[in-house]
Image: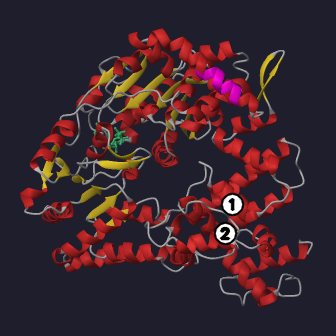
Amino acid sequence: METLPKEIKKIINDCYPYIKEFNPAQKHVIDSGYLENRDNYVIAIPTASGKTVLGVMATLEAILKGGKALYAAPLISIQNEKVKEFKQFEEHGIKVGKHPSSSDLSVMVFESFDALTRFSWDTLRDVDTIILDEFHMIGEYSRGPTLECAITRAKIINPNLRIVALSATLQNMDEIEGWLEATIVEHDYRPVPLNKEVLNTEMFNTNNKNEVVVKIVEKAIEDNSQALSFVSTRLFTENLANYVSGKIKRKVTTEQKKRFKKVAEAILEVPEKKGSRPTSTCLKLAESAENGTAFYHAGLFNEQKEIIEEEFRVGNLLMIAATPSLMYGVNLPSRSVVIRDYTRWTSQGSQTIPVFDYEQMSGRAGRPQYDDVGFSYLVAKSLDEAHDLQERYVHGEVESTNSKLIENKDAIYKQIIAQVSSNLNKTPEEIQDFFKMTFYGYQMNNNPSMALFADDSLKFEIENALEFLLKNGILQAIPSGLNATALGNLIAKSNYSVETAVKLKEYASQTEFIDTNQLIYHLASTSDLPLISFKSRKNKDPVREMMAKKGLFATDIANPEATTVALIEWIDERNEYEIENMYNVYSASTRRSAYEASLLVKFLKNIFETIGKYNYSKDLDYLSARLYYGVKEDLIPLVLGVKRLGRKRARSLVNTFGEDLRPYSEKQLKKVEGVGPKLAEKIKIFSETYDN
Ligand SMILES: Nc1ncnc2c1ncn2[C@@H]1O[C@H](COP(=O)(O)OP(=O)(O)OP(=O)(O)O)[C@@H](O)[C@H]1O
């Protein structure tokens, strides 16, 4: 701490009082001159080893000299967490927020940073330093290209921008170093030493991996600690949580049972607050929670996921069984981590997980300030398998982090549109030059065996992409060079995939009449609508029958069809309890899917208008509102006109008094359950001003 500039030291001491001294990894970074020079940096130190505070100090260094700083994170949840953490800097006169134009330190997600590089150059030029959290996501198929191209554009628009990347340890750091022209600092310090083991079911006289998980949880109970178990599917998380719950219930003390019971009750309250009864998934989750275990996957209500995270943190859950999605964005360490499944389903079938994912899951083991050691376990069913896992994972090297910019076709389209619509590039040659400056371009040109093909293969990809974009009316070739059409500019301003935009444009071009059910099915076939999943492969007939009843031809009955039917029921005012039981789907994600569908309908309306079809706008506005509120058409004026009324009370009002509420007094309106004086007054004002 002593070597810190005193201003920074004061702020760190005030805002992080529990940080008495820097750990070896942090010292290693600081001693490298990190706060004295303005080099780009890549800081690769393990999870929970204090990267954030290192990033923070670089921002403070810039801000205290009168500059502005950005902190870019991969997820909204991390963005919110960091804003909350950094807000305390305001006591030192540092403005913290989400928008660089009004903050000294602004925290944003990668997509917002990308938008800054495309639409707000002056604001970007005011930024002195950017911190890129979870930088290793640059190798991710879906979001890596966005991050990579945003960095490339930022370096062009603001060449003096200092880039500090916070990353997990990567195998090909030299390539990152070359591309970013950065100083790489790596260190393997962890606040809590990690003990990586491979267990063999034969050691426990069983061939059931779940038995091994039970033993680990029983050990956790003895140590007064907890366990995180990672499995490959939602159903497995539920089965494992239930299995362990049943096996440990006799080992749970009365005092623990009381606390666990409260967690179960909180879980069941969530659907009730939403006007739905607990679904069978809620009941299953509550049953597990009563004995201290929970399952965690995307098919739960968000509020239930938050309850599980919070209760685990305070020790009111002994084990969470989760799909790997928990890895990203939820800071939930545990003394023990069990990776029961090391395979996952991909489009090419079942594949073993990358070593990188193993490291990310393992890295969760060991809670700073609590545990003196963390344990990560892989589970094998034979000695040979155990040996293989030891070699591949425990002693394995993480894979190279490679650009996915060219593999991800949609990313090429999106980036070419971005370059042309922001007037950064007007010709294929300029586009090619841009791509050469990306991480992809750097890797190709610096790989001796690839350099020979680099230019030609890039030229080929860009020409193919331009042909597609011109053919689909997204770009046009005019004498002054390539230009984005109205559709192209619309896509550039959205985060939707080009594939989705083209599908919706085709729909808009061919449609003469809006069939709501057909349109919802069309939305469910795009890659941008979060799907509602079947709970199991069996019992798909109700969905199949409903699709047929609505005149929707489906060759296969899978999650797009389940989503279509769930959303049709949702706008028919069914609730999650009914939808789950009627169609055997994880209906807790209905609201989120319906919300995203309502936004997609607005996007479709804009697409209609870019091709000159304005006479569908009203229908589409109505459908967007129906999806957003989950209502039939007759309720739209009321739910739109009275904020926070909600569909349940709106339906009760219309069922009680009819659509015209003008004749009724506030006293009469208050007779409807859930309508208090304030709401009755708002309803009265609305009814008198609304032109029935
Ligand atoms: N030197 C230190 N002494 C004590 N606590 C520290 C120290 N450095 C950081 N911490 C605290 O340890 C916790 C983990 O730090 P931080 O979140 O920065 O780690 P991280 O590397 O960013 O983790 P992740 O990779 O999950 O983002 C935070 O609460 C942080 O304030």
Q: Which residues are magenta?
A: 461-468
Q: Secondary structure at mark 1?
A: helix
Residue 685 at x, y percent in the picture: 84, 75
Amino acid carrying mark 2 in the image: Ile
Residue 218 at x, y percent in the picture: 15, 66
In the foreground, 531 or 283? 531
Res. 568 mark: 2
Q: Quadrant of the N terminus?
A: top left
Q: Quadrant of ligand 1?
A: top left
In the foreground, 520 or 423? 520
Dot 1 alpha-carbon crowd within 10 angstroms: few under 14, some 14 to 19, many 20 or more: many
Drawn side of residue 191 relative to residue 308, left or right: left
| 270 up-or-down from 101: above or below | below
Given contact means CB atoms under 8 Å apart, are the residues at marks 1 and 2 in contact? yes
Res. 520 mark: 1
In the foreground, 106 or 495? 495
Residue 216 at x, y percent in the picture: 16, 60
* Disc 1 from disc 2: Cα separation: 8 Å
Residue 210 at x, y percent in the picture: 21, 63
Does any portion of residue 584 appear in the rendered image? yes
Does any portion of residue 64 appear in the rendered image? no
User: Which residue is depicted at the point 70% across and 18% down?
Assistant: 425
Amino acid carrying mark 1 in the image: Ile
User: Which residue is depicted at the point 47% across and 31% down?
Assistant: 132
Q: Earlier in the sequence, mark 1 or mark 2?
A: 1
Does the magenta portion include 465?
yes
Dot 2 alpha-carbon crowd within 10 angstroms: few under 14, some 14 to 19, many 20 or more: many
User: Which residue is depicted at the point 69% across and 30% down?
Assistant: 468
Q: Quadrant of the C terminus?
A: bottom right
